[in-house]
Image (spheres, rainbow, N blue to C red):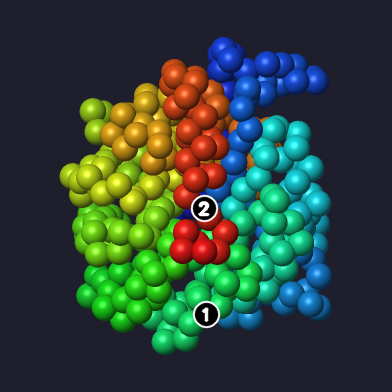
């Protein structure tokens, strides 16, 4: 299944915003607590020092290069966006389309701004060199996690959830790192079942599901959560990322985001949910990303809002891993 990462905003934010939010300059709403963006993609137009992924499809490479030359997502640019809306810090998520497993740019900017960025790198889960790389990057670079993503093979199996990836998972478990997962398939139920097995086998890994594991964007009592999605609520080390990409898919399908988020928080708990903008990938402004997300959370108590938008992420993304 091709996941549409370019769905345009299907609706506008309603007039009701958080009752607890003060008004910032220009009349925009600001939360009464800091925000933590767990899904920011950074890239630069300095292609001499940080060349783009030569293996990317030509069309993708050209599109990313055009965007990077026009508006590179450097720390200076992203921080200015964050400051405008009250985002204190966030995760730099390695941008697969741009750099693949070449994490040098992300590591360099994280080292330069450790107070604002923590690194989620991308490595090949089945590469025999990955466990040693994780250990070194946790110790020397202070990464807080690694991201594994992809589609199933011809047999329906995900390599990063298979036996060949066990050494990488075991090292992340020993280090206490987060593993951010984005399996992509027409039917997500087998992947969610494998996630449950890994969460049980590696209890020191904080397993983070990008886009809440892509539940079907539909209204109804379960809001698209399969039985396998719901079963993950029994594993305390599994976390769920609520993103702009997911919000736009819900809006495109006509699914109300407020009730959807209320159901997710009721199913998993706000202390196991986090939020991310997908800036650098999803089109739109930081103000739009934040306003739409906050509006969808307006029905939640303040303590749950703060957990979703800051506290849970601050707790689970630990530079160097919890073993450090």
Above or below for 160 versus 280: below
Residue 244's x, y, as percent?
53, 41
Above or below for 53 versus 210: below
What is the count of numbered marks?
2
User: Helix, strand, or loop for circle 1?
Assistant: helix
Seen at 39% across and 80% down, the residue is: 126
Residue 175's x, y, as percent?
44, 67
Seen at 28% across and 39% down, the residue is: 224
User: Helix, strand, or loop for circle 2?
Assistant: loop
Seen at 75% across and 20% down, the residue is: 24
Seen at 61% across and 36% down, the residue is: 35
Above or below for 112 versus 169: above
Residue 174's x, y, as percent?
39, 69
**How many residues crowd around disc 1 within 10 Å: few (fewer than 14), some, or many (20 or more)?**
some
The residue carrying mark 1 is 133
- Work out which quarter of the rendered image holds the N terminus and state it: bottom left
């Amino acid at each position: 299944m091709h996941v549409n990462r370019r769905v345009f905003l299907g609706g506008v934010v309603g007039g009701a915003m958080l009752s607890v939010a003060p008004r910032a300059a220009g009349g925009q709403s600001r939360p009464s607590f800091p925000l933590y963006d767990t899904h920011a993609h950074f890239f630069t137009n300095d292609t001499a020092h940080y060349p783009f992924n030569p293996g990317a499809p030509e069309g993708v490479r050209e599109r990313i290069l055009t965007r990077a030359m026009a508006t590179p997502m450097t720390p200076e640019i992203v921080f200015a966006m964050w400051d405008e809306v009250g985002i204190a810090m966030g995760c730099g998520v390695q941008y697969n389309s741009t750099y693949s497993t070449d994490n040098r740019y992300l590591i360099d900017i994280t080292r330069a701004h450790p107070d604002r960025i923590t690194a989620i790198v991308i490595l090949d889960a089945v590469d025999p060199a990955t466990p040693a790389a994780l250990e070194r990057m946790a110790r020397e670079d202070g990464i807080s996690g690694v991201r594994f993503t992809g589609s199933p093979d011809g047999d329906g199996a995900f390599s990063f959830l298979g036996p060949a990836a066990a050494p990488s998972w075991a090292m992340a478990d020993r280090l206490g790192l987060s593993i951010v997962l984005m399996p992509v398939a027409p039917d997500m139920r087998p992947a969610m079942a494998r996630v449950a097995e890994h969460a049980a086998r590696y209890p020191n890994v904080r397993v983070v599901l990008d886009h809440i594991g892509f539940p079907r964007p539909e209204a109804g009592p379960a809001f698209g959560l399969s039985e396998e999605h719901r079963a993950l609520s029994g594993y305390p080390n599994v976390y769920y990322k609520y993103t702009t990409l997911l919000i736009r898919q819900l809006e495109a399908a006509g699914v109300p985001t407020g009730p959807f988020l209320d159901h997710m928080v009721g199913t998993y708990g706000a202390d196991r949910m986090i939020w991310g903008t997908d800036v650098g990938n999803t089109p739109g402004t930081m103000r739009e990303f934040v306003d739409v997300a906050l509006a969808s959370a307006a029905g939640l108590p303040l303590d749950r809002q703060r957990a979703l938008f800051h506290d849970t992420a601050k707790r689970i993304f630990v530079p160097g891993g919890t073993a450090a």
